[in-house]
Every structure is written in structure tokens, then in C-alpha cells.
Image (cartoon, helix red, strand yellow):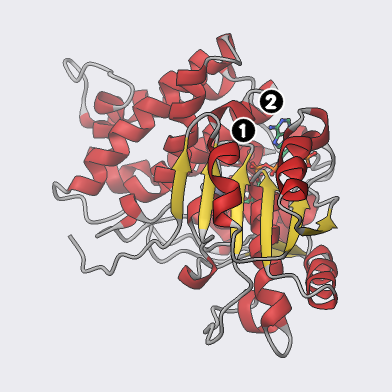
Amino acid sequence: MNNFIYENRTKVYFGQGCVKEFLTCLLRDYDTVMMAYGQGSVKRNGIYDEILNILMKEGKNVVEFSGIMPNPTYEKVLEGAALARDRQVQVILGIGGGSVMDCAKAVSLAARCSGNAWENYWARRGIIDFEPIPVGVIPTTAGTGSECNGADVITNGELKIKTGYDYPRCNPRFALMDPAYTFSVPGEQLAAGAFDSLSHVMETYFSEPDEQNVSDEIAEALMRSIIRNVRLAVKDPEDYTARSNLLWDSTLSENRLIKLGKKCDFSCHLMEHQLGAYTDCGHGQGMAVLHPAYYRHIFRDGLDKFGRFAANVWMIPREKKSREELAAAGLDALEAFIRELGLPTSLRQLGVRDKKQLPVIAGSCHFSPGGYRKMMPEEILEILQECF
Ligand code: NZQ
Ligand code: ZN
């Protein structure tokens, strides 16, 4: 394994009823609480009322910051930061999916930083030498893992860049994770979120070192769990066991644990983020379109690992197959799974109308040093064209 340092300061409270049980105590030291949420789902499913009642009962000054959009924009972050400063917010509660949690973390950073936040913390990896406003999160989707990491993926609409770094200092102080809060997630988002978690694991697993290591073993278990439980949740959206597993799978996939000792690829994420910057497509949907094409490009550079993926994740028998046939069978299974979940399979379905857009998108993508092969702009363009 490669050397590593591990830190994760988010304290997790997991299970049905955890918000009612623990929120009051977690907010004991704060008077002014920002409630950050999205475009209305929390009002429709009752989560907003449940939380507001708790805050009111405790006599908190509540500052509402609503309307956070999927793929939150830097503009929205600045709006939240100005509000937080103006109302002297002491703690931010991010209640929603990855977009809301990311935006809450970004607001906490932007509100306390001096200088241009984008230039200092998004345009490049910066150094946070101050304490951002404390953040607590209450995830209502399973997928991104934002609840237990320090990443805040933000879109700068003007510059057409979607990006974010994982800053340990931006980890939420606490995450209250009630799987029942994800019951109302619509089927399309359920599939997209599960595929996002699967992507986080695959992007970590398909990277060196490939010698036997515990991170890869955990990764295989996580992939099997995501596949099994999303199928169960599709059948019965209120299957609490399936939703619990998916929610915890999501956290474990992106809380740095399986990355320990690994180089990590994340080329597909870097491509998807730019796709999102230009099309505003859903993140998990974008990952579903890009992954098969990307892996068809690189699988010969990591043939045995792709074979292991086929055998240990999709349970494809090794017998009577060459190394290449086995690896390719795993990718066939991945593609079939994407179709089974009804996820999009082409860029057109994501809203790309004109092939002429593709060189611009390809040219704007960053490269990952951790993959089996370094992607150059020409190959990224080829992949995008194949996905069109
Ligand atoms: O805005 P509302 O009304 O809340 O509706 C949301 C939104 O329309 C809805 N939703 C959320 N919870 C719901 C619900 N609808 C019904 N019932 C519920 N319980 O779902 C829609 C999508 O929400 P969103 O938060 O955008 O989805 P997701 O959780 O997939 O987050 C995606 C964002 O996270 C970023 C993505 O790039 C994207 O911006 N990511 C963050 C990462 C991180 N912080 O580590 C890593 C990921 O790779 C990813 O980049
Ligand atoms: Zn992702």
C-alpha cells in the first residue's frame, strides 16, 4: 500500500429517528442556525417541518437559505455567504442531497474567508488557515458521500467550470443520517445516486496499487452491496434495510476510507464535472453515460483488475475465458446494469444537442494522474464522441 494519513472528523448519528433524538443536543452551543435546503422536496416530504419544529422548540434564531439548485452555483454560494455574515450565523444545517450539503460547506468557507473565495479554494487547492462556520448535515439522498467529506463541488457559470477539493477542515461536524429520509427520493434519482456511489468505488478500485490490499477488498464488498440494495430499493422504495445499506454505502464510498493506500483515478468524475458545467446534467446520470466508454478505452491497461471486477463483483465464472474475455464480460455486466436501472446511455439524453460542443468540453477537462493511463484531450474527445 502507498503511505497515507487518515482523518475524518465528522461524527455520524445513523438510524431512524436520529434527528429527533440528537439534533437538540448537537445545537446546544449555538443560537443562530442557518437552515440550508433545496428547491422544495424537504417541504413536500415533511422533513422541513420536523426540523423547524425542533429548532423553534429550542428557541433558535432560524435563518433560512433556500432554493439551492442541483449542481449548485458559485453565485448561490456567495448569496449564502453574504446572508450568513449579515445574520451572524453560528452553525449551518445542510438538509438535502449532495448539492445542498456541498453548498452548505461552501457557504461556511466563503463566509469566513478573506479575498476571492473562488480563486483561493476552487480554482486551485488552497490552504484553509481559519475555521469555517461549523456545518451539520442531514442527507436526504444516498450517493455523493458529501455527508462525511470536505468536498464542495461548485459550478462557476461564468467560467464554465465545475470543481471542488476535499478539504478536511470542511468536513461537517456531524451528520444525522436517517435512511427513512431517503424514502421519497424519486426512482430516477435513486438510480443516479446509487450509480454515483458505485462510480466512487470504481474510480478508486481501478487504480494502483493492484497488489492485494484491504482497500480493494472493501471496495468489492461495497460494489456488491450497492448493486444488491439499489435493486431492492427499486422494487420497494420503502425497504428500510435497502435504504440503510445504500445510505451507508454512499458514505463509505467517499469518506476517504477505501482510498487509503490507493492512487485513485477519478478521470470520469473530472470529465463529468465539465459535462455538468456545460449542460447542467445530473451528476449520477453523467457518470452512467461516461463510465462504460471510458473503461472500454482503458481496460487493457488494467486487464487483470477488470477481470477481478468481473469475477468478484458480477460473479462471472472465470472458466473458459481468456483474460480479455473475462474483463470485457465485466464491462458488459456494468452496461447491462446501467440499462436495467433506466439510466441514460448517451450524451443526447443528457441534453447535449450539438456534437460541435464536444471539443470545447473535452478541452476544458482536467486530467487525473492516478488512472491506468493518462487521458489526453484527443482521447477525452473520442470518448465524448462515442457517448454522443
Ligand atoms: O432541490 P430539492 O427540492 O431538494 O430536490 C432534489 C433535487 O431535485 C431531489 N431530492 C433530494 N432529496 C430528496 C429529493 N427528492 C425527494 N425526496 C428526497 N428525499 O433530488 C434532486 C437531486 O438532488 P442533488 O442534491 O442534486 O443530488 P445528489 O445527491 O446526487 O448530489 C449531486 C451533487 O453532488 C456533487 C455533484 O457533482 C452534484 O453537484 N457531488 C459531490 C460530491 C462530494 N461532496 O463528495 C462527490 C460527488 O462525486 C459529486 O460530484
Ligand atoms: Zn460522484
Q: Residues within 10 Å of mark 2 (few under 14, many from 20)?
A: some
Q: Amino acid at mark 1?
A: Ala
Q: Residue at x 45, y 48 (%)?
A: 12
Q: Is 131 situated above or below 319?
A: below
Residue 105 rendering spot, x and y as whole percentages: 64, 63
Residue 128 rendering spot, x and y as whole percentages: 54, 82
Q: Which quadrant of the structure image shows residue 60? A: bottom right
Q: Residues within 10 Å of mark 1 (few under 14, many from 20)?
A: many
Q: Quick one: SS at disc 2?
A: helix
Residue 19 rendering spot, x and y as whole percentages: 59, 40
Q: Tell me, yes or no, if residue 281 can be seen here.
A: no
* Label 1 CB less than 8 angstroms from ligand 1: yes
Name the residue carrying label 2: 188
Q: Residue at x 20, y 50 (%)?
A: 210
Q: Quick one: which residue is furthest to the bottom in this view?
A: 115
Q: Which quadrant of the structure image shows residue 265? A: bottom left
In-front residue for pair 30/369: 30
Q: Amino acid at mark 2?
A: Glu
Q: CA distance from mark 1 to mark 2?
A: 6 Å
Name the residue carrying label 1: 192
In-front residue for pair 126/309: 126
In-front residue for pair 130/299: 130
Q: Residue at x 70, y 38 (%)?
A: 388
Residue contact at pointers 1 and 2, CB within 8 angstroms: yes
Residue 20 rendering spot, x and y as whole percentages: 60, 38
In-front residue for pair 168/159: 168
Q: Quick one: SS at disc 1?
A: helix
Q: Quick one: which residue is furthest to the left in this view?
A: 212
Q: Residue at x 56, y 79 (%)?
A: 131
